[in-house]
């Protein structure tokens, strides 16, 4: 009976060690979908970001007339450097001094042309809107020259919680989920790629999207691109506070556990033998 228990114990240890092994199946990206890795419909779409209340815009006005440029562009000779840093998510002094906050009514207050409603519009639409309004004003000035406007959203970011928690800047127009994870240093071996969640707010409605990042078909799905202010939640693989990631480690842990089990078994067996011997003598008397 004891011998049978010993073998069951050894099998249980081996099974636990093997189940704790982090396999390539659990951590690799771009895998073919099957019954464990989901198929995703070809729903890829990218919509230009629509401005929201609380966003900040950096606006730069181009003109051959230096007086016009000096009138509208903060930063003087450093304007080009400042514009580049802000568009890449960097900081340049105080945002308040060089950017336009979209207020609760969805407006920005732009010099000489006043309040402009921009909420719900793309930066491209705001560019054309400001160019039109400035052109109307500046045509009344003698020697008017055409202007061109560049509009950038500053301080665009996304957040990751759970694993590699932090806030990261979006430094390009389109950012994919893989680029976002790469910025965070990838996921590590014990974080789940199977159930990544994105919390996203749009038009006052918060939605939670869940997807499996291992599926090859994610590149054609709605989950491929992230948006500013997205929150990406990554959880640990259940039961992997302790894990084994190499076959050699499995063998080593199993061997050590078996040795310890045999040691405990020998102590228990020795004790049983002594008890049997003692009570055996007592019975013979």
Image (spheres, rainbow, N blue to C red):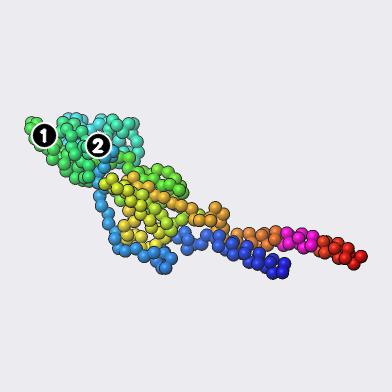
Q: Residue at x 46, y 56 (%)?
A: 192
Crowd around label 1: few <14 · some 14–19 · many ≥20 (10 Å):
few
Vertical placement of residue 139 versus 29, above or below: above
Residue in view at x 22 percent, y 42 percent:
119
Q: Is residue 200 magenta?
A: no
Nearer to us in this view, 64 or 209: 209
- Compared across the picture, whether 36 is left or right of 136 comes to right
The chief SS type of the magenta part is helix
Residue 267 pos. (x, y %): 76, 59
Q: Which residue is mark 1?
A: 137
Asked where in the image residue 144 lies, by quadrant, the reply is top left
The quarter of the image holding the C terminus is bottom right
Judge from the rendering whether residue 25 lies leftward or rightward of residue 121; answer left or right: right
Residue at point 36%, 45% (across, down): 158
Residue nearer the viewer, 118 or 136: 118
Q: Which residues are magenta?
A: 262-272
Residue 265 is inside the magenta segment: yes
Mark positioned earlier in the residue sequence (1 or 2):
2
68 vs 249, left or right, is left
Q: Quadrant of residue 79?
A: top left
Q: Position of residue 212 (x, y in %)?
A: 40, 59
Quadrant into which the N terminus falls? bottom right
Above or below for 199 versus 131: below
Residue at which label 2 appears: 104
């Amino acid at each position: 009976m004891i011998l049978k228990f010993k073998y069951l114990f050894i099998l249980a240890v081996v099974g636990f060690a093997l189940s704790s092994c982090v396999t390539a199946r659990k951590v690799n990206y771009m895998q073919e979908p099957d019954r464990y890795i989901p198929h995703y419909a070809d729903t890829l779409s990218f919509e230009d970001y629509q401005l929201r209340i609380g966003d900040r815009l950096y606006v730069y006005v181009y003109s051959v007339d230096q007086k016009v440029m000096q009138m509208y562009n903060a930063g003087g000779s450093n304007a080009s450097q400042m514009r580049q840093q802000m568009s890449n998510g960097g900081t340049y002094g105080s945002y308040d001094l060089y950017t336009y906050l979209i207020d609760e009514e969805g407006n920005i207050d732009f010099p000489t042309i006043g309040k402009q409603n921009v909420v719900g519009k793309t930066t491209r639409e705001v560019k054309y809107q400001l160019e039109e309004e400035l052109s109307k004003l500046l045509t009344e000035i003698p020697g008017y020259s055409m202007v061109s406007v560049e509009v950038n959203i500053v301080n665009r970011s996304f957040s990751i919680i759970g694993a590699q928690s932090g806030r990261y800047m979006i430094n390009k127009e389109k950012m994919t989920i893989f680029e976002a994870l790469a910025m965070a240093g990838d996921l590590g071996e014990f974080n789940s790629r199977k159930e990544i969640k994105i919390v996203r707010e749009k038009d006052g409605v918060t939605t939670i999207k869940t997807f499996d990042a291992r599926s090859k078909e994610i590149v054609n799905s709605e989950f491929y691109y992230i948006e500013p202010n997205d929150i990406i939640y990554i959880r640990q693989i259940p039961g992997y506070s302790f894990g084994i990631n190499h076959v050699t480690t499995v063998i080593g842990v199993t061997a050590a556990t078996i040795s310890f089990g045999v040691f405990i078994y020998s102590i228990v067996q020795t004790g049983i033998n002594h008890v049997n011997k003692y009570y055996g003598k007592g019975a013979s008397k």
